[in-house]
Image (cartoon, rainbow, N blue to C red):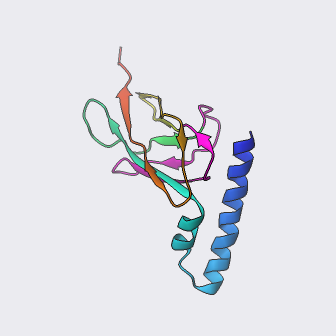
Amino acid sequence: MKSTIIRTLLVGCILIIEVCLNLTGCDKDEVIHELVGWVEGTAIDSITRQPVEGAVIRDTADTTVTPRARTDSLGYYKLAATPGTRFCLYCSKEGFITKKSLRLEVRKHETMTVDFELVPLRKE
């Protein structure tokens, strides 16, 4: 609960910073990158080794929570993370078994890579 509140506040701060940066003409991506940590990676099919497009990345197993990111056509995702908080990521897609990452702690200015190999469900 506490980490969810912190994340919500961070997202709000980032939005305010984006508005201010747009008004001043500064490079928002460069400034935001200095304030947060990042997690990026890919999701692939464990059998075909092909990218999994549209996989959902969450920081909770609760599927009713809004996803933090979705993979693109190359299976790639990237999301901002609150520095100093510990969390796990969950990668899910219909037709595959949901995967959970190890516990993560991102530092400010750091980009961590977390890749997922999704195992297709057996068709019976």
Task: Say which residue appears at 70% left-offset and 44% top-offset.
Answer: 4
Give the side of residue 118 with respect to residue 10, left or right: left
Give the side of residue 8 with respect to residue 107, left or right: right
Give the side of residue 47 with respect to residue 34, left or right: left
Q: Residue 106 placed where, x, y %?
A: 54, 49
Give the side of residue 105 with respect to residue 115, left or right: right
Magenta span contains residue 69: yes
**Residue nearer the viewer, 92 or 124:** 92
Magenta part mainly helix, strand or loop?
loop
Report the span colored magenta: 60-88
Task: Say which residue appears at 36% left-offset and 26% top-offset.
Answer: 120
Q: How many marks?
A: 0
Q: Quadrant of residue 108?
A: bottom right
Magenta span contains residue 70: yes
Q: Residue 26 placed where, x, y %?
A: 57, 82
Location of the N terminus (image quadrant): top right
